[in-house]
Image (tube, helix red, strand yellow):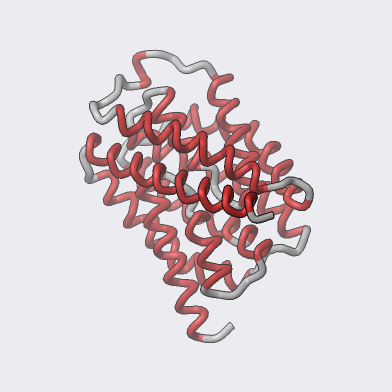
């Protein structure tokens, strides 16, 4: 790896880390295209390599939110435990599943949840006013884990919209909880892709150097932002991701 590629890797990691801390996602949505386009990695390597980098990135963001009391450990554990098996299954199915169709479905889900977050710009009723059944968190974890392993992302794109949209969790708490769950969810996918030889550890090292401080910065910005403004930012971000993913995959399917 050249010095230029290393610098690009650090830059990709930093941008991904900021988005991770700010929006409660793993950062793979930026790492994957960045690794493929800027660093010239094969698609499967670009998809798998972000997974080990997401672990320290999400852990840094989660620790920042935890210090401010914005992490629901119970919810994170109930999502992570069943999500682990789903993540391993998703990673193992990367060689047989049509990810284009899955991404279209994921984009539609994101679109629906993003609109829900944008509609709820008034502060939602705190989730502590009612006890969310553990089975609900487990179901979210299974979906998030499967998507994480299959698409090489942390799973926050599933977790945050469900917590902040469907369950009405205060957004900062949803972001911190998502990051904590992601720390666990990326482990099985990392193991499976390592065994399959899909991870470039040199690229992992460079993006991680940038991602960790980026995650701390992004989480700090989110914690200092008003709930209403943050909901607008997160909802808009998810909306853009949903439209971009959906259109790109529909175009790919049409051109087949």
Point 76% across, 48% down: residue: 92
Left-right relation of 102 to 71: right
Q: Residue furthest front?
A: 255
In the image, residue 59 sits, relative to residue 208, either above or below, namely: above
In the image, residue 69 sits, relative to residue 97, either above or below, namely: above
Point 44% across, 15% down: residue: 131
Q: Nearer the viewer, residue 94 or 74?
A: 94
Which corner quadrant holds the N terminus? bottom right
In the image, residue 169 sits, relative to residue 221, either above or below, namely: above
Left-right relation of 15 to 154: left
Point 52% across, 46% down: residue: 246
Q: Nearer the viewer, residue 218 or 230?
A: 230
Residue 180 coordinates in the image, percent (x, y): 48, 41
Left-right relation of 61 to 95: left
Q: Quadrant of residue 145?
A: top right
Residue 250 coordinates in the image, percent (x, y): 58, 48
Q: How many marks?
A: 0
Residue 199 coordinates in the image, percent (x, y): 67, 64
Point 45% across, 72% down: residue: 10
Which corner quadrant holds the C terminus? bottom right
Residue 117 coordinates in the image, percent (x, y): 35, 32
Q: Residue furthest top?
A: 130
């Amino acid at each position: 790896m050249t010095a230029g590629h290393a610098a690009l890797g650090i830059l990709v990691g930093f941008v991904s880390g900021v988005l991770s801390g700010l929006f409660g996602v793993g950062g793979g949505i930026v790492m994957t295209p960045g690794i493929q386009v800027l660093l010239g990695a094969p698609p499967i390597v670009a998809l798998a390599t972000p997974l080990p980098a997401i672990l320290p990135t999400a852990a840094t963001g989660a620790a920042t939110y935890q210090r401010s009391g914005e992490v629901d450990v119970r919810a994170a554990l109930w999502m992570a435990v069943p999500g682990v098996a789903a993540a391993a299954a998703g990673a193992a199915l990367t060689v047989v599943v049509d990810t284009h169709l899955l991404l279209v479905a994921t984009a539609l889900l994101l679109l629906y949840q993003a609109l829900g977050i944008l509609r709820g710009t008034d502060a939602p009723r705190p989730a502590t006013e009612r006890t969310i059944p553990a089975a609900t968190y487990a179901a979210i974890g299974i979906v998030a884990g499967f998507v994480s392993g299959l698409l090489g992302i942390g799973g926050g794109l599933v977790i945050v919209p469900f917590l902040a949209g469907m369950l009405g969790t205060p957004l900062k708490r949803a972001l911190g909880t998502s990051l904590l769950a992601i720390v666990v969810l990326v482990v099985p996918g990392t193991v499976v892709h390592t065994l399959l030889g899909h991870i470039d550890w040199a690229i992992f090292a460079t993006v991680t150097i940038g991602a960790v401080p980026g995650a701390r910065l992004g989480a700090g910005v989110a914690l200092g932002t008003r709930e209403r403004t943050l909901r607008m930012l997160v909802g808009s971000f998810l909306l853009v991701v949903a439209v971009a993913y959906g259109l790109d995959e529909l175009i790919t399917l049409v051109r087949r």
